[in-house]
Image: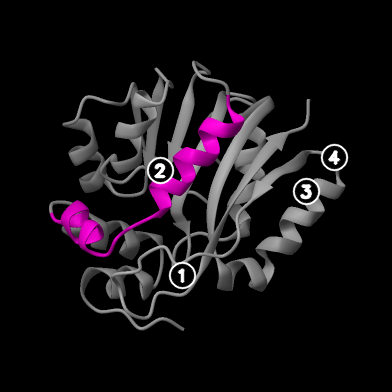
Amino acid sequence: MAQHHGHLGAVYGAAGPQEVAALYDRWAETYESEMARAGYRHPAVGVALLARHLPRGARPVLDAGAGTGLLGEWLGIVGYPEVEALDISAGMLEVARSKGIYSRFHNLPLGAALPFRDGSFAGIISTGVFTTGHVGAEALPELLRICRSGGVIVLTVKESLWQGGFAVSLEAAVASGRVSLAEMTDPYVSMPGEPGTTPSRAVALRVTP
């Protein structure tokens, strides 16, 4: 198990969604500078996969776990003109709102029922969310439901979660015919500047037409 200190250690050790939200609220103002020092790679890897598998101009895209909008800033640059932000932390979303890059905001957790119609989004991207103390495979069915037929879902997944049940859940979804695996990266360290960071991987999924 990775041993982290400061804000990162606190959110990884949170007891539940309410504590996670409160901790991220307090972290919002310094989150981006701290993650930059850690060499945070998930947003870059996620955007690369989305751009490879979701056609330019597809809309809308859901940034699920948007935080302060680190990834959202890049989505517009690479050709996705309508992006909605979802995050458990109202404080993080306030920072994201100040950037003027999202069309709508949803202060909601992943892992429970979401208030969107079936097939609401052409694409969904979620980086740094499927990780220690945050969200697990229980969030996958709702993401599949709200992504439209033929749409793309990109996720980064901590290797401990992958081995701890996420891979099995994904295999079951593929076997059911609901989704196919379009691409999977090799394991990589998401924060090379943060000692003790354990590997993650990223996947691109295509919802079956």
Marks 2 and 4 sit apart, C-alpha to C-alpha, by 28 Å
Inspect the image, locate mark 2, and give the three-letter code of the amino acid beneath it: Leu
Marks 3 and 4 sit apart, C-alpha to C-alpha, by 7 Å
Residue behind mark 3: 173
Secondary structure of the residue carrying tag 1 is loop
Q: Mark 1 or mark 2: which comes first in sequence?
A: 2
> Marks 2 and 4: which is nearer the front?
4
Pointer 4: residues within 10 angstroms few (<14), some, or many (20+)? few
Residue at (36, 42) in percent of width and height:
66
**Residue range corresponding to the magenta coloring:** 30-54
Q: Mark 4 or mark 1: which comes first in sequence?
A: 1
Residue 77 screen position, x and y as percent: 34, 25
Q: Mark 1 or mark 3: which comes first in sequence?
A: 1
Camera-nearest residue between 21 and 178: 178
Q: Mark 3 or mark 2: which comes first in sequence?
A: 2
Marks 1 and 3 sit apart, C-alpha to C-alpha, by 22 Å
Magenta: main secondary structure: helix
Secondary structure of the residue carrying tag 2 is loop
- Disc marking residue 177: 4
Quarter of the C terminus within the rendering: top right
Residue behind mark 1: 132
Pointer 1: residues within 10 angstroms few (<14), some, or many (20+)? many
Residue 86 screen position, x and y as percent: 39, 38
> In the picture shown, does residue 152 fall above or below 158?
above
Residue at (31, 46) in percent of width and height:
67
Residue behind mark 2: 108
Inspect the image, locate mark 3, and give the three-letter code of the amino acid beneath it: Ala
Residue 114 screen position, x and y as percent: 53, 38
